[in-house]
């Protein structure tokens, strides 16, 4: 499932997020972090190692995970370039990679925690200083 | 209750009961000090519970496995030495906390004060009973930290802060040296267990012949010397006198500063009997004894005299523990141990008197006092007993241990032979002369002579019994130990000496044993002491001229310069590194990321040709992609906050939808829930922030930001099309393990769930902790307002 359009979408989200975290307005900055975290999560999920296409849930009708399919492997030989393919791997799995999903699940929840925290922080900053402009805040802090 | 349980409780109950102290304070209000005294008394009883076994010559050791893979155990070793310290710490603790009831004003922050005192007491007890060097180190640093907090008790006074910082910098750094010494010791002997090394002749033989012997000894000694304010490290103790006086009496004269002495006594059986031990321990000891004795004589602040006197007395102990030869490893051990006990009684007593005097006269300056004997008769008598004991006058306990000090000095000099047989006793007498002189000065300055016509309050009187009784009790001990030395010797000194020398010892201390060399030395001391005291002004003149001429002969001079320079350099560095605004840091980070990526891109340009592009996606997925980009652009460009946030949450739901197509139902579910919650939080926060601020971006900045964003997007795109699924990394992926073992090991069908709650359960625990922390943070942020509104 080597999906070029998905890659392009993720890249564009990264670009938009980056542009937003360079704004002076704290609220825009937080929105930017939201966009970036979506992009990162999608990136991680889309780079799982398996060629499989099934949901990583073991069904009772058979499938114990490993199946004999051939796949590809990176070499770690730097002389051929870090990204150089391609050696045949031993065995392959019918599922998509569960590990990246577990990682992202944790990341989603943590991003909720951080978003909530910085939002309240921004809200308190506005209450204390009456502005959400980072440059103005720095001037007020001296 | 067996002794091990008793000791464990004695150590940990103070921590636990201090923990609930704020709750108890609600009930007892300003009587909370009595609760703290009761806790200390409980510890005293628990130590006493373990004592009989030790007095009869036994030792107790018990371990609980803690980090067995590293050989680190939670382990207590109870012998004469640790029991004597246990008694001193908890006993003086009871006295100090009772006294504080009278000393501390009701307006003070009493819960914090007593809580920290109890934390200190627990740490100190834990330290003296530790059998394991790592455990000892932990409790050791805990005493440094509690001492830091207590010295800085009055947080608004600059001198308190200065003194607290100084003590922490010196003692905690010394503690790190000690830890390094323990690690060297472990490298040589292969164990962290002190009794194991102590009782094994073969290990000691290896140690004494080892190349790193000296390194281990010096490192551990630096720890001991910094804690006990010996040698150049003495400078922190005088500044520590900024603490409330009961704290000074407890930590900085009777217990914590003796931790270094304790350590020296504890490792005595391991390191003594070598020349290095004598030169290092006795050498630094004698030097400090003379220097601090002289400086004590020169002070005019009562607590200043007592602080330098403490340094000097601790140096006596160091010197005596240092007396050693190959055949007689512990010449001064009995004398040192007895003096240690006596010092705890008379110095704590004098500190209590100092507290009373300062409390009643509102000054600590000895030059502004005089003639108070008539107004404070009881305090006067107590002070005289304490000071004369310190000066070494019979029949008080200080006399006995000073005789023993002289005796061991004579013996050490005799064993070394040559000029040493004169020099060591002579230096000991010189130390005694200073001690005698400042003891007399203390009494004369405060109580004798004429009352100054002004500067003192009109009505000065003895304080209430709350403050007087503890001091009287200590004065009683001083007389008792002096008249009937067999009591302390049988119950405390004997078992301790046996514990250090590792053999049965029978000590006999008598008040009168005929005309001996030590007695003659004592008489010489008295004569010279009186002479020195009468020549005070000449000596003072000489020292002032010396100081004016050589200001750089002072450790404080270097300490202050170092701290000042460190502050300047770091503040210059951080101002240079972070001149602001924050946005520049973000730009710098992004540029770094781009630069890092540029190198492989340039190197691998040829292999980055996309060889497996795939545009063959179902139409509905393409539509999702399009909507995602549109809603992200909406979040970025919509001018008002609320539409932008709606647009952002639209993006979130689209991501959830996409997760379904990516075969990740768990993620989709979580994403929907989280997106809903965060949209609610967003809207709640944002309705309170009206959009006043519109950023007008200069075109150059806009071009720069767009350039960075486009570059980042390009990098990510290149990375992704080269690293999409189907490419397996050069090592075997962990995922295989999870797929294969999910059902057999964890019994779960949903592999993602199994990973989260089972295989990587600790990660999830961490995640939950992050959520809790964020919740606490939000709660506190919301509550942080209102102080000024």
Image (cartoon, coloured by chain):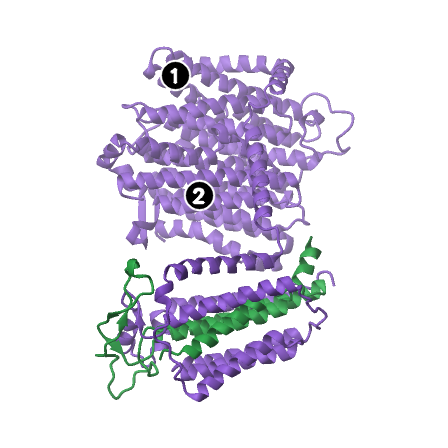
Of all chains, the one bearing label 1 is B
Q: Identify the element where label 2 is drawn.
A: helix
Please tell me whether mark 1 or mark 2 is closer to you in this view: 2
- Residue B180 locus on image (x, y percent): 38, 40
Using residue B418 as the reference point, say whether residue B640 is left or right of it. Answer: right
Mark 2 or mark 1, which is nearer the start of the sequence? 2
**Is B414 or B398 nearer to us in this picture?**
B414
Q: Give the alpha-carbon distance from disc 1 to disc 2, as whole Å.
A: 34 Å
For the N terminus of chain A, the image quarter is bottom left
Chain in purple, by letter, is B
Residue drawn 23% across the image and 32% down it: B205
Is residue B490 among what the camera can see?
no
- Residue B90 locus on image (x, y percent): 48, 44
Chain A hue?
green
Q: Identify the element where label 1 is drawn.
A: helix
- Residue B456 locus on image (x, y percent): 75, 31
Q: Are marks 1 and 2 in contact (CB under 8 Å)?
A: no
Is residue B93 among what the camera can see?
yes
Q: Which residue is mark 1?
A: B410
Q: Is residue B57 above or below residue B385?
A: below
**Is B403 or B408 nearer to us in this picture?**
B408
Q: Of the numbered discs in the image, which one, if any, rests on residue B140?
A: 2
Residue drawn 49% across the image and 38% down it: B171
Of all chains, the one bearing label 2 is B
**Is B256 or B508 nearer to us in this picture?**
B256
Labels in figure, total = 2
């Amino acid at each position: 499932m080597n999906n070029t359009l998905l890659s392009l979408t993720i890249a564009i989200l990264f670009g938009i997020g980056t542009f937003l975290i360079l704004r002076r307005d704290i609220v825009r900055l937080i929105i930017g972090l939201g966009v970036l975290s979506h992009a990162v999560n999608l990136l991680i999920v889309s780079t799982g190692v398996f060629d499989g296409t099934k949901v990583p849930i073991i069904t009772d009708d058979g499938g114990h995970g490993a199946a004999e399919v051939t796949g590809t492997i990176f070499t770690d030989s730097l002389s051929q370039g870090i990204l150089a393919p391609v050696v045949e791997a031993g065995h392959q799995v019918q599922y998509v990679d569960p590990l990246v999903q577990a990682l992202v699940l944790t990341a989603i929840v943590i991003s909720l925690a951080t978003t909530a925290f910085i939002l309240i922080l921004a809200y308190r900053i506005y209450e204390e200083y009456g502005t959400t402009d980072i440059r103005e805040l720095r001037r007020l802090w001296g | 209750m067996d002794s091990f349980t008793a000791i464990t409780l004695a150590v940990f109950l103070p921590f636990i009961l201090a923990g609930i102290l704020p709750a108890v304070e609600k009930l007892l209000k300003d009587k909370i000090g009595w609760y703290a005294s009761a806790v200390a008394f409980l510890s005293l009883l628990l130590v006493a519970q373990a004592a009989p076994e030790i007095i009869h010559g036994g030792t107790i050791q018990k371990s609980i496995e803690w980090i067995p893979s590293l050989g680190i155990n939670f382990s207590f070793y109870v012998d004469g030495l640790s029991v004597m310290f246990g008694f001193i710490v908890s006993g003086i603790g009871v006295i100090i906390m009772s006294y504080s009831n009278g000393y501390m004003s009701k307006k003070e922050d009493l819960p914090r004060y007593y809580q920290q005192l109890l934390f200190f007491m627990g740490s100190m007890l834990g330290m003296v009973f530790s059998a394991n060097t790592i455990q000892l180190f932990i409790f050791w640093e805990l005493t440094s930290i509690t001492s830091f907090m207590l010295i800085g008790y009055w947080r608004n006074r600059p001198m308190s802060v200065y003194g607290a910082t100084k003590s922490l910098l010196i003692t905690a750094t010394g503690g790190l040296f000690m830890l390094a010494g323990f690690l060297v010791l472990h490298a040589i002997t292969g164990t962290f267990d002190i009794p194991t090394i102590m009782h094994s002749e073969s290990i000691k033989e290896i140690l004494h012949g080892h190349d790193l012997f000296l390194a281990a000894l010096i490192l551990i000694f630096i720890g001991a010397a910094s804690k006990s304010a010996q040698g150049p490290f003495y400078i922190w103790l005088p500044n520590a006198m900024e603490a409330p006086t009961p704290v000074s009496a407890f930590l900085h004269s009777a217990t914590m500063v003796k931790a270094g002495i304790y350590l020296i006594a504890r490792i005595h059986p391991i390191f003594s009997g070598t020349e290095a031990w004598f030169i290092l321990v006795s050498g630094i000891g004698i030097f400090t004894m003379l220097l601090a004795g002289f400086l004590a004589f020169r002070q005019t602040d009562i607590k200043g005299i007592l602080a330098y006197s403490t340094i000097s007395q601790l140096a006596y102990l160091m010197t005596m523990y240092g007396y050693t030869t190959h055949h007689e490893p512990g010449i001064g051990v009995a004398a040192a141990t007895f003096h240690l006990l006596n010092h705890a009684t008379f110095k704590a007593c004098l500190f209590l008197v100092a507290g009373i005097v300062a409390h009643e006269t509102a000054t600590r300056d000895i030059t502004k006092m005089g003639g108070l004997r008539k107004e404070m008769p009881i305090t006067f008598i107590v002070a005289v007993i304490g000071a004369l004991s310190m000066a070494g006058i019979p029949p008080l306990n200080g006399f006995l241990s000073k005789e023993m000090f002289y005796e061991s000095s004579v013996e050490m000099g005799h064993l070394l032979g040559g000029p040493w047989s004169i020099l060591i006793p002579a230096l000991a007498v010189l130390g005694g002369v200073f001690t005698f002189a400042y003891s007399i000065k203390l009494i004369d300055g405060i109580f004798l002579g004429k009352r100054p016509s002004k500067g003192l309050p009109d009505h000065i009187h003895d304080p209430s019994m709350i403050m007087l009784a503890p001091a009287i009790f200590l004065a009683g001990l001083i007389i008792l130990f002096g008249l009937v030395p067999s009591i302390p010797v049988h119950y405390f000194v004997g078992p301790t000496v046996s514990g250090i020398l590792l053999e049965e010892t029978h000590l006999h201390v008598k008040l009168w044993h005929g005309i001996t060399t030590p007695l003659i030395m004592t008489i010489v001391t008295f004569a010279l002491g009186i002479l020195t005291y009468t020549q005070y002004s000449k000596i003072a003149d000489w020292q002032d001229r010396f100081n004016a001429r050589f200001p750089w002969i002072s450790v404080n001079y270097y300490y202050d310069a170092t701290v000042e320079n460190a502050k300047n350099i770091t503040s210059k560095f951080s101002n240079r590194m972070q001149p602001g605004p924050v946005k520049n840091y973000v730009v710098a980070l992004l540029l770094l990321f781009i630069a890092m990526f540029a190198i492989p891109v340039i190197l691998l340009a040829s292999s980055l040709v996309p060889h497996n592009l795939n545009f063959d996606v179902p139409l509905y997925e393409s539509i999702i992609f399009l909507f995602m980009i549109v809603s992200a652009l909406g979040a970025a460009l919509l001018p008002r906050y609320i539409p932008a946030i709606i647009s952002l949450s639209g993006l979130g739901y689209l991501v959830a939808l996409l997760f379904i197509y990516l075969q990740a139902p768990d993620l989709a579910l979580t994403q929907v829930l989280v997106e809903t919650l965060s949209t609610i939080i967003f809207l709640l926060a944002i309705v309170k922030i009206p959009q006043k601020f519109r950023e007008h971006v200069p075109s150059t900045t806009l071009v720069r930001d767009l350039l960075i964003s486009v570059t980042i997007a390009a990098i990510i795109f290149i990375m992704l099309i080269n690293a999409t699924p189907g490419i397996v990394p050069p090592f075997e992926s962990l995922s295989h393990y999870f797929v294969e073992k999910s059902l057999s090991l964890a019994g779960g069908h949903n592999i993602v769930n199994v990973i989260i709650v089972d295989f990587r359960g600790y990660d999830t625990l961490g995640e939950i902790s992050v959520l809790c922390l964020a919740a606490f943070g939000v709660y506190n942020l919301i509550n942080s307002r209102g102080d000024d509104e």
